[in-house]
Amino acid sequence: MGWDENAGYSTVTSVEPLVGLASWNNNPYACPPGEYELNMVFDPDYLKTVVFDPLGKYSCAAGSGGMINSSPTGSGSVKARQIYCRITEISLLVGYVNPVGAGYVPNSISLKYNPMQFARELITSATINTTFTVPASTRSIILCLTNRFRHVCADAEEVSLGGAGITSFGKVADTAGAVHPDVTDGSFIFFNKGYNLSFTDAGAIAPKIEGSVDYSKIVDAGKYQVYPWQSAQISLGNEIQPREMYSNLSPATGQMSRPWMDYTNFISKFQGLKASNMSYAQYCGFESFFREDGVGAGDVSSFLPFVIRNPSGTLATTLSVRGQLTAPPDALANQELVCIAISDQLWSVGFDQSGSELPVMTETNPLI
């Protein structure tokens, strides 16, 4: 981690690719010749999302659930279970390749790419009947279930844990025992049932990880639970997917075979993979990298992908989502439905071969 004994601290460099540019079919993260403008907005909760503690050791109570961006000074200023950092530089790394010599005018080119549109909607009922506005050139839809919670101990990059009824919520165990009467050490208590119960011994408590607790004693834990799909179907224009509505779904009992088959076909078609990058146990939220495997103990979970095959020229933009959850979530759970629409676009860059090296035309058009 770059520990410097003389300086007394670690230097860490974090490099993240831009997700939007990763959707290019030709040479990921590469753009054709031209002039570009990139607008970025920094996450206001970045101190809660830059790092992730999956075991809840760093509850970061002093930082309100996030790191503290300063160096502690003075006796007693370093708080237990708190992460401190000092960000010294933020930069955008861009590389480019160009021919040697002046006067080179690139050829006009057109590239097909697939932008992704994200939309979120809070869920407070077990019955879902909602609509989203998507591009007319939409070719696939991905539905995810998650809950809105920002904390160092919550995985900010995971948007589908709710597909197996896994909540990311939790609280700091205070000294008064207001969160859990038996835990007062300031650690982070996960409210997810699957992280704290053992399903291998008739529901008995088992030490899945150091710090697992008796779930039944967590105060109001039930109000923060999220619930998976029981049935689901979407429609866009004349396209209805799946034709026969998903029904009787249950990740807890492994009844996810139809969505799983559609997921593997989806991965094979668009990513060129012959097999899934998730096992069926992971898809059902059973397999964990950090804990004892069990129902609702996974670190990744299921999402529902749909391929849209509307005829050419279809201008439908209203996506309808219908479904049923296994139970209605409480308002405190902040459960969300995340809709990802992936569309086809054509990016064209034109050059005057007898003139400037700069493009005379740059435009994007939907492929409908």
Image (cartoon, rainbow, N blue to C red):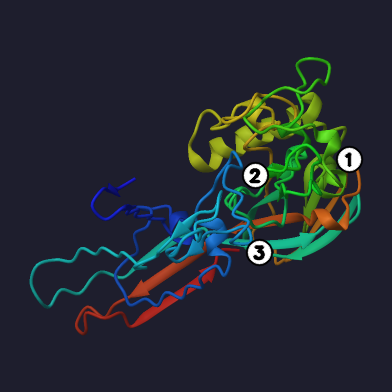
Q: What residue is rendered at 23% in x and 52% in y?
A: 6
Q: Quadrant of residue 97?
A: bottom left
Among numbered discs 2 and 1, the one appearing first in the sequence: 2
Left or right: where does residue 336 sit relative to residue 39?
right
Pointer 2 residue: 187
Which secondary structure, mark 3? Answer: loop
Which secondary structure, mark 2? Answer: loop
Among numbered discs 1 and 3, the one appearing first in the sequence: 3
Under mark 1, the amino acid is Thr
Q: Tell me, for residue 137, which label it has, or none.
A: none
* Residue 22 spot, x, y in % from top left: 44, 55
Left or right: where does residue 71 sit relative to residue 49?
left
**Residue 329 can be seen, yes or no:** yes
How much space separates mark 2 and mark 1, taking CA atoms? 31 Å
Left or right: where does residue 114 sit relative to residue 188?
left
Q: Tell me, for residue 313, which label it has, or none.
A: 3
Mark 3 residue crowding within 10 angstroms, few (<14) / some (14–19) / many (20+):
few
Q: Residue furthest front?
A: 75
Question: Front-most of 278 and 135?
Answer: 278
How much space separates mark 1 and mark 3, taking CA atoms? 38 Å
Q: What residue is rendered at 34% in x and 59% in y?
A: 30
Under mark 3, the amino acid is Gly
Q: Quadrant of residue 64?
A: bottom right
How much space separates mark 2 and mark 3, taking CA atoms? 56 Å
